[in-house]
Image (cartoon, helix red, strand yellow):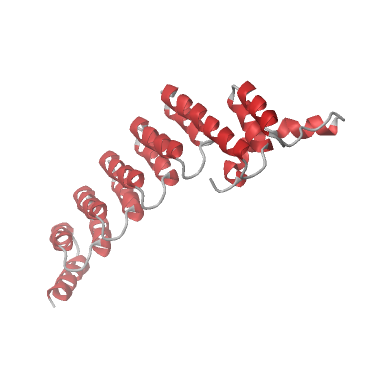
Amino acid sequence: MKGKRTLGAAWLVLFAFMFVFAVTGCSSVSTISDDSSWESRLTAATTFGEVARVYWDAPEGSEAEKVALEKLKTILKSRLAAATTLEEVWGVYRYAPEGSEVRKAVLEKMLSLATTFEEVARVYRYAPEGSEVRKAVLEKMLSLATTFEEVARVYRYAPEGSEVRKAVLEKMLSLATTFEEVARVYRYAPEGSEVRKAVLEKMLSLATTLEEVRGCTGTHRKEAR
C-alpha cells in the first residue's frame, strides 16, 4: 500500500468525528506507541470503522499499521462475499486498498454482476490499464453493445492492434446502415486489412449519389496501389 493517502476521501469520513472530539476540549486520541496499547485496541476493534481508526492512529510503517491493514482486508473480503448487488460491491471497492487482491476481486465480482452496457462501462473506468480484468470488461461491453455508437465507444477503449479492436470493427460494420457510418468504419480499419476491403464493398452498395460512388472508386484505387 502506498501510504495512508491511498485510503482516499471516503475513509477520511470515518475519522471526521475525531476533529470534533478535539475541538470540544476532550483529550485527543494518542498515537499508538507500544505493543500492548495497539494490540489491545486492535483486539477490541470489531467493526470496519474501529479497525480503520487503529490503522489511522498507528505510526506509518509500524507493525500496528500492518496488522490493522490485514484486519481491514479481512473485513472487506467478508463484505464482498456477502454482497449480492452491484451497488453493494461498489461500496466495498471504495474502501479496498489500491493494487490489493481485494480490489481485484471486487472488480471481478462487479463485472460478473453487471448486466447492462453502462454497468460494464462503469467497471471499465476502474479496471487497471493492461489488466486481465479490463480485457474481460471490453469483451463483455462488446457482447452487450447493440447500437453502432455503443460499439464505436468500445473501439475507443480497445488497445490498438488488439483482437478486441478487430472484433469491434467487424461488429461496427455489421451494424452500420448508412453510407456515413460505413465510411466511419473505413477510417478506423487498418490499411490493407480484410475489414477495410469489406467496408469498401458495403460503401459501394450503400452509395446513392454520384459523389459517394466517386468516393468509393477513388478509395478503391488508393487501396489497390
Q: Position of residue 95 (x, y in %)?
A: 54, 35
Instruction: Give left or right: position of 93 versus 186.
Output: right
Residue 121 rendering spot, x and y as whole percentages = 39, 42
Residue 65 as seen in the image, left or right of residue 155: right
- Give the image location of residue 166, x and y in percent: 22, 55
Q: Tally the marks.
A: 0
Q: Quadrant of residue 181?
A: bottom left
Query: In percent of the image, x 70 and y 29: which residue is there?
Result: 37
The quarter of the rendered structure image containing the C terminus is: bottom left
Give above or below for 125 relative to 17.
below
Residue 27 versus residue 117: which sits nearer the camera? 27
Q: Residue at x 30, y 60 (%)?
A: 160
Residue situated in front as seen by the camera: 2 or 168? 2
Q: From the viewer's perspective, is 31 left or right of 161? A: right
| Among the 4 quarters of the image, the one containing residue 203 | bottom left
Camera sees residue 107: yes
Q: Residue furthest front?
A: 35
Q: Taking 122 as reference, is 184 above or below it?
A: below
Question: In the displayed image of the protein, which residue is found farthest to the bottom?
Answer: 225
Looking at the image, can residue 14 be seen?
no
Nearer to me, 215 or 208: 215
Residue lying at the far right of the rendered structure: 25
Q: Is residue 38 left or right of residue 22?
A: left
Coordinates of residue 34 in the picture (x, y in percent): 70, 35
Quadrant in which residue 84 is drawn:
top left
